[in-house]
Image: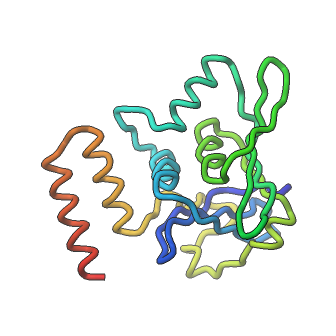
Amino acid sequence: MILVNIMNVSLSNMGFVVFLRSGADTDKRTLPIFIGAPEAQAIALHLDRVTIPRPLTHDLLKTVMDNIECRMKRAEICALRENTFFAKLILEWNGVESEIDARPSDAIAMALRFTAPIYVAEEVMEAAGVILNETTEGGTGPNTEPPSHRLAPAEALKQKLAKAVAEERYEDAAALRDELKKLSQTN
């Protein structure tokens, strides 16, 4: 298993993607995983330390697990079958370790909330990992803080819009919606 760090969450023309970079100095591979918009938002909001008035699903699950004293030891991206990534949560409860099947996006979101490490199986990294150039990476190296919070302008506006709606600031939400509409018309 390869320990990875979240390098970035961004929006591409194919959808949202999270980039997991090997934590080893000698391994420059990055694993891109396409994820859904809600999971991208859950990951990005947590990375940006944005507080919202009501808990998201991953926050709720963490609270429940904390209350029953269940600990998340790690997340593992463990397989790639028919272009689909598979992951699992490694949990410990009452001294018993359990493996729970999960989507990679949910495993990553939960690992962030528990500050648990994220691992990728060597065969998965070998099959789907890529080496990004410095321009693509934004100049980050394995020993620097990843630019996790950097999102495309449209995604940043979508996050602000979601937060405004969640906080019931509808005038702000309308203005953000209009900005998003203008941005989409210029692209």
Q: Is residue 11 left or right of residue 66?
A: left
Colouring scheme applied when the structure was drawn: rainbow
- Quadrant in which the N terminus is drawn: bottom right
Q: Is residue 7 above or below residue 99?
A: below
Q: Is residue 95 left or right of residue 143?
A: right
Q: Could you say where residue 55 lies in the image, as x and y percent from the top left?
A: 43, 33
Name the quadrant containing residue 26.
Answer: bottom right
Q: Could you say where residue 12 lies in the image, as x and y percent from the top left?
A: 49, 74
Q: Is residue 143 above or below residue 58?
A: below
Residue 121 vs residue 86, the one in the foreground: 86
Q: Residue at x 35, y 68 (%)?
A: 153
Residue 127 vs residue 143, the one in the foreground: 127
Residue 104 vs residue 130, the one in the foreground: 104
Disc tally is 0
Q: Residue at x 34, y 33 (%)?
A: 53
Q: Residue at x 25, y 66 (%)?
A: 180
Name the quadrant containing residue 27.
Answer: bottom right
Q: Is residue 141 left or right of residue 178?
A: right
Q: Could you say where residue 176 lies in the image, as x and y percent from the top left?
A: 21, 58
Name the quadrant containing residue 70.
Answer: top right
| Residue that sits furthest to the front in the current view | 82
- Quadrant in which the C terminus is drawn: bottom left
Q: Is residue 135 above or below residue 58?
A: below
| Residue that sits furthest to the left in the current view | 171
Q: Residue at x 69, y 61 (%)?
A: 143
